[in-house]
Image (cartoon, rainbow, N blue to C red):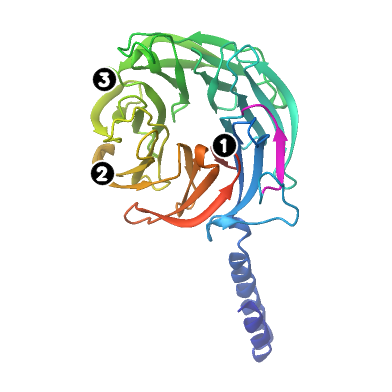
Amino acid sequence: MIDFFLRRLAAFRQPIREAVFAAVMVLAAACSGNGDQLTLLVGTYTGSGSEGIYVYKFDQTKGRLVHPADSITEAPGAYGKVKVDNPSFLIAPESGVVYAVSEMDDSTACLNAFTFDKTSGKFTLINSMPTGSPDPCYVSTNGKLVLTADYGGSLSAFPIASGGGLRQPQVLAGTVGGPDPKRQAVPHVHCAYFTPDGQHVLESNFSADNIVEYDVAGDSLVSTGTFFPLNADYGPRHITFSPDGKTCYVIGELSGDITVFQYNPDGMMLKKQVIKADPGDARGSADIHTSPDGKFLYASIRLQNDGISIFKIGDEGMLSPAGFINTGKHPRNFDITPNGRFLLCACRDSDMIQIFRRNTRTGELKDTGRRIHLSKPVCIVFN
């Protein structure tokens, strides 16, 4: 189509020809698709075929990988990787530094900092620091601190050094109090989330069925004694906010519920709603995200009838059911493309990432049939 317009330029006089040429160049840039090619990083559980973090190019208009000429054998379509033990959660902030946990159940558990070149897919380790508690399973940052939630029982707050490296962490212990004698017998922390205003951190205190709030004070956290109770036997897992920062959503791994909080500028939260995400009560609810336009919320369900529950977000952030779709086995983590057109789901026990098309009007998901094949994918991040 672009060639057709260029051929027709000869029919115009010089001033008009120049204007048409400029317009054609804008059209060519829009059609090139380069702005729709995203860098996709995938964290895995290692030891059964995968070796760490893998890098792909993903076209968010077409909903498929952009395959490089030279592809990694154990993860077809990948053009970069770094070997690291169990990078089960990672983040790729705009600083160009990737932070990834090594989810180990002993003293080797750590947080890793890498520089990352998304053109080449090359990682360079800056440093690694022990988390001070086993099984780190979540990472977040505000540019001054990097936080890990450690299922072994604590929240670890790492000050960021010059160049993006990590300094010794502040370790804050979780508590107990929930009724499950097996899964809540010892402290577990599952998420550490910076509030959108940057003033606070919310911790999902899994074994005590509450959300603990800390104040952010430079490169450390300050305990205020504030916590927000959830229903008993809730097991809070992941936390997310509406794009406008006014509503907080917390999914319960044990209860299969989502709790909706109104978030106020003073850091206080008012419980507004509790709604069931997993009607089968499989006690394995996992991840939660809102769509980029803030109109829908999605939650992954594991252990029975694996899939994704869909909710419409109404007035004041309230939820109403809008559908459900089955996925592969153990949908631990998922992410939505920035344009909102596709949802990618990491199905750990099916050894694949499943690609769904989103209906941006209804929120419904449709399986495209396309897959990204690799062993034990558990974390998806668009860079």
Q: Nearer the viewer, mark 1 or mark 3?
A: 1
Q: Quadrant location of residue 224?
A: top left
Q: Identify the residue at the far front of this view.
A: 48
CA distance for labels 1 and 3? 32 Å
Task: Examine the rendered structure and indicate whether residue 137 appears above or below residue 369.
Answer: above
Name the image quarter holding residue 316.
top left
Is 51 rendered above or below residue 221?
below
Q: Nearer the viewer, residue 209 or 50?
A: 50
Q: Secondary structure at mark 3?
A: loop
- Mark 3: amino acid: Asn
Q: Which residues are magenta?
A: 78-86
User: Could you tell me if the residues under marks 1 and 3 are in contact, i.e. CB atoms within 8 Å?
Assistant: no
Front one among 52 and 157 = 52
Hey, what amino acid is under mark 2?
Pro
The residue furthest bottom is 11
Q: Is residue 244 above or below residue 271?
A: below
Closer to the chain start, of discs 1 and 3, is 3
Taking the spot 63% from the left edge, 65% from the top edge, the residue there is: 32
Q: Residue at x 75, y 53 (%)?
A: 70
Q: Position of residue 43 (x, y in %)?
A: 60, 35
Mark 2 or mark 1, earlier in chain:
2
Q: Is residue 215 magenta?
A: no
Residue linked to disc 3: 231
Dot 2: element: strand
